[in-house]
Each structure stands twice: as structure tokens, then as C-alpha cells.
Amino acid sequence: RCEECSRTFTSGGKLMQHKLRLRYFCCHCSRNFPSVSELKLHHSSLNITLHVCPFCQLFRNEEPKNTVRHISDNHVKDWISTECMECKKLFKNKERALSHLQLKHGVSKVDGEDLIRVRDFRCLYDGVLKNT
């Protein structure tokens, strides 16, 4: 029997398949949600601090070490990024950021120097990095 919807199944395998279809899983209370928006709404009702991946904003976890692991596994090249100060978009290097400014914001590369900044995200997790 499914705890979420009270539906009954003839076997444990069918129940597991049903649970896998409910793919938005809360790691805090083990409940499943049919959509990302419902999971986010549920998370907002919990009294927890979530560490959000600064690169994709998709990974959220209350343990900073898990966020560091996610970043290391998925965004290791992004630890140091160049940010467009106009739209906050991140780039792997200065040249890509300057090209973006020119194409998307109509700013020349010479003037663009003042509209980019290097972001080192390692400092956000400095204590965690030393302990992992």
C-alpha cells in the first residue's frame, strides 16, 4: 500500500514502480511529490537551511558537504567563474563573458572589463572543503 496516495498493489514490485513514478522525493521526510513546485512548496514549510548549488540552482541539500560533493562531481571547472554583472550569468573564462556582454548587452569588450568580475565559489564552502 502506498503511503502517499493510499493505493493498494498486488506486489511489492508494483508498489516500487509506482513509487518511482512519484519522482520528486523529499530527503527530509521521505515523502514524494508529483511536481517540483509542490516539493519546493513543501520545503518552504520546513524549518531547515538548504544549501543551493550556486551553479545550477537545482541541487539543494541541508548538508553543505553534499553540496560540495555535487559541485565537485558536476561543476568542478566552475569553482572559479567570471560573472556578467548585468545579468549574473556565469562563464568559464573572461573571454566568454566579454563576448556575452558584446552579443547580449551591446557592450564593447573594452567597456566590458568593468562589467565582469571573477567569482571564486570555493570560499562559500571553505570549512566544508577542509573537512572532506
Image (cartoon, grey):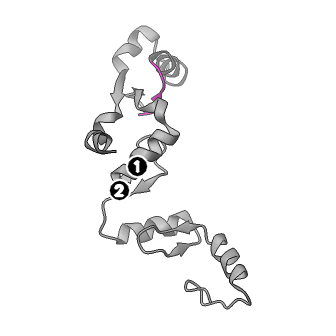
Residue 83 pos. (x, y %): 40, 28
Please report the bounds of the magenta region as a residue range.
Answer: 88-93
Please name the amino acid that badge 2 sits on: Glu
* Residue 100 in the image, given as x and y percentages of width and height: 52, 22
Whether residue 1 is visible to the viewer of this picture, yes or no, is yes
64 left or right of 56 in image: left
Hey, which quadrant is residue 111 in on the image? top left
The image shows a total of numbered marks equal to 2
Above/below status of 68 relative to 98: below
Which residue is found at the position 49% from the left and 68% from the top? 39
**Badge 1 amino acid:** Thr
Instruction: Classify residue 34 as left or right of residue 45.
Output: right
The structure residue drawn at horizontal position 56% and vertical position 83%, both measured from the top left corner, is 4
Task: From the top left corner, tell me how far across and down residue 73 is, in percent.
Answer: 51, 41
**Would you identify the image quadrant in which residue 21 lies?**
bottom right
For residue 80, above or below residue 5: above
Give the CA distance from mark 1 to mark 2.
7 Å
In the image as oriented, which residue stretches furthest toward the front?
A: 132
For label 2, the residue is 63
Looking at the rendered image, the quarter that the C terminus falls into is top left
Q: Residue furthest top?
A: 110
Residue 90 is labelled as none
**Circles 1, 2 touching at the beta carbon (< 8 Å):** yes
* Residue at the image point whose x is 41% and y is 34% from the top: 88
Magenta stretch encompasses residue 78? no
Residue 42 is situated, as x and y percent measured from the top left of the image, at 43, 71
Q: Residue at x 43, y 55 (%)?
A: 60
Q: Which residue is mark 1?
A: 67
Residue 52 in view in this figure:
no
Q: Examine the residues drawn in magenta and state their main secondary structure.
A: loop
Q: Secondary structure at mark 1?
A: helix
